[in-house]
Amino acid sequence: MAEADDANNWKSTVLCRYFMHGACRAGENCHFSHNLEDKPQLVCRYYLNNSCAYGEKCRYDHVRPSKRISNVDCEKTQKPNLSTDSSQQSQVCSKPSKNGLLMSDGPTKEFHMVKLCKPNSQQNNSLPSGKTAEEWVRAAEFVPGQKWKGAGPGSYVEAASTGLKREDELTFCTESESDIITTLTEGIQSELCPYAAATGLCQFGDRCHYLHGDICDLCHKAVLHPTDEKQREQHQKECEKSLEEDMELAFAVQRSKDKSCGICMDVVWEKNPPSERRFGILSKCKHVFCLSCIRKWRAAKQFEHKIVRACPQCRVKSDFITPSLYWVEDDDEKEKLIQGYKDALSQKHCKYFDRGRGECPFNENCFYLHAHPDGRKASPKPIRRRRRENADGDIDIIGQIILWDFLEERNLRHLTAELDDLDLEEIFQLNFADSSDESDVEFDLFQY
Amino acid sequence: MANIAIQRIKREFKEVVKSEEVAKCNIRVEPKNDNFTELRGEIQGPPETPYEGGMYILDIKIPETYPFNPPKVQFVTKIWHPNISSVTGAICLDILKDQWAAAMTLRTVLLSLQALLAAAEPDDPQDAVVAKQYKENLEMFNTTARHWANVYAGATKREVECDSKIQQLKNMGFEEHKARVALSTYNWNVERAMEHILT
C-alpha cells in the first residue's frame, strides 16, 4: 500500500500527457498532475531499455528517473525530484558515463551508422568494447530470400519489443539501474491493467505486469483495485451514477419515441431528415410539437401576436420554446432543460449587443451574453421614461424618444414599408439563423 | 401543395373516418379530388335546434400553407343562421379566421361548426338580416330556420304555414327561392315580401 502511494506521489507532480493535449478521461482521479505549470515526464522507454534507435535526436527525454538513485550508491545525498530540474537529472544520469560506462544511446546510433556505412573503418574507442571487427566478420551470412539471422533486431518493432539486449550492454546495467527498473515494475504492479479493465481480457493473463482488478457488480468489468479501498469506493460511486444516467436516458427514449407533433402529426422521432427530430418544448404547457413546426407557427405573421405565442392546442401563452432531443414533461426536468438552454445561450455573444458596439432591445432580459471585449459583463441599461402632460393635465409615461428615429424613419420610409410587419422577433431569428442550429431563441419583450 | 399539408390532411382524413362522431353519423368528410386540396364535409343539424334532422354539406378548401392557415369552409346547403350567409353560405367563425390554431383539425372544425349551429352569435353576424330577426323575434327566427332546414337540408319537420305562403307567391308567378328569401326577410308578411320582390 505504501509502495503504491509512493509510486503515485511522484506522478502527482508530473503533468498528465492527456491533460497536456486537452483531455484526460480520468479527470480528477488521474494520478498525474493536471497543473499545466508542471512539466511532463516523457522519459523514453526505449532508452530505459537501452534500445532507443533515435539516440540524441529522440523527442523523449533520455534521462534516468533519479528518484531511487539517491537511495542507492550514487553519491547524491538529497532526494532529487524527478520533474523539477532537468539539468540536475542529466547530471545524475551522466555520472555513469564519466566512469566510462556508455549509457546514452548516441554512441549506439553511431555504432549503427558505422555498421551500415563504413564496416571496415577504424574502430572508435567509444564503441562498445565487445563489438570488434572480428565479430563483424563472423556475422551471419545474408542469403537472399531468407530472413537474415543477424545479431541485431530485424525491425524497429522487434527492437522496441525485445530491446537490444546485447550482453555487453546489459553489463552496463549497474546495481542502481536495475533498482530503477525494479521500482518502475513495482509502480506498474500497483496499477490496473487497462486491457483487463476495458474488455475483461488481457492477452498476458497471469503474466501481465499490471494488476487485474476484481470484477464490479454493476459494470461487470475488472476495474476494482484489490487493495485500494478508496478506488473501489470511487468506482462504485461512479458506476452507480452512470447507471442512473443510463436509466434516465432509457426513460427519456421511451417517453420520446412515439410522441407525435400536434401540428404536422408526424411522430417526431420518425421525421425526415433526422435533423428534424427535435422537440420544441413550450415553457408553460405540456403539448408536444416538433421544433420546426412550433417555430413556424410562432413566426406566423397572419395572426395576432397573442395567438401565435399561445400553444396551438391549449392556447396557453409561452414566452419561449426550448429545443430538446428528448421529450420532457416533468416540471423539474423541464426546468433543468430550460436552465441548461439558457446557460448555453448565455455563453454566446449577443449579435445585437455586439460586445458593446450595438444595442440589444432585450436589454438585461436577453438570453445571450452581453459582455464587452475585455470580458466585463454589461450592466443593464436603465429604462428611460419620459413624462408628457396632455391638454387635460394627465401625465403619460412614454418611452425613449430620439430625434434621430424620426429623421431616420422619414428617410427610410420607402425601404421599411415592406418590412413593416416583420416584428422584432423575426429579425432576431433571422439574425441568429446562420450562427448555429441551437442558437435561435424566441421570446417576448418582457419590459414593454 | 406543400408536403406537410397533404400529409396532414391524409392523416386527419383517417382520424375523421375512425372517430366516433362518424360512427354516430354526426360528421363526415370525403375528398373531392385526389390531392386532397378540396373536400366535401357533412354535418348533422344538432338536436334541439331548428336544424335538427338536417344534413348540411360544406365545401372545404385546404390552403397550401395548411395547417399554419385555416381551411376555407363554406356552406353549400342553404341555411338560415345569423353567422352564416343565407346567400353565399360564408361562415363567420373566429377559428376559421384570426383565432385559428395549427393544432386544429378537420374534425375539430366540423364539430365547431356544429356547435355554432347550436349556439348562434347574433352580435357578430355574417347575415345582418337573419341576425336582426334572431334578436327581435326569436320565435319567428326559429320557424324560418326550421323551414329552411326542412326545404334545403332534408329535416323532417315541416312548417306548413311557411309552405303555404310560398306556394301562394309561387302561384302568382314568383320564383320559389326568391319568394322564400323575401318572406323570411319580412317575417312571413306576404304583402311586404311581394312589395320587396316587385321593387
Image (cartoon, grey):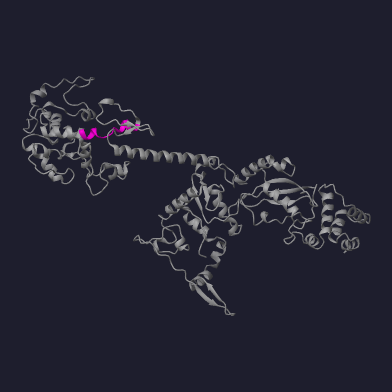
Of residues A104 and A375, the one nearer the viewer is A375
Is residue B31 in sight in this rendering? no
Q: Position of residue A354 (x, y in %)?
A: 41, 61
Q: What are the residue bounds of the magenta stretch?
A: A186-198
Of residues A336 and B102, the one nearer the viewer is A336
Residue found at x 60% / y 54%: A315
Q: Locate the C terminus of chain B by quadrant.
A: bottom right
Is residue B88 in sight in this rendering? yes
Q: Answer with left or right where residue B195 lies relative to residue A197.
A: right
In this rendering, the count of numbered labels is 0
Is residue A192 magenta-colored? yes
Q: Position of residue A104 (x, y in %)?
A: 13, 36
Q: Answer with left or right where residue A431 lies relative to residue A129.
A: right
Is residue B116 magenta-colored? no
Q: Position of residue A222 (x, y in %)?
A: 33, 31
Q: Answer with left or right where residue A214 lies relative to residue A342.
A: left
Residue found at x 65% / y 52%: B70
Query: Is the stretch drawn in magenta largely helix, strand or loop?
Result: helix
Q: Quadrant of residue A346?
A: bottom left
Q: Quadrant of residue A224?
A: top left
In this picture, is A104 found above or below A319?
Answer: above
Of residues B14 and A67, the one nearer the viewer is A67
Q: Answer with left or right where residue A270 lies relative to residue A191.
A: right
Residue found at x 50% / y 42%: A274
Q: Position of residue B4 (x, y in %)?
A: 60, 45
Q: Quadrant of residue A418?
A: bottom right
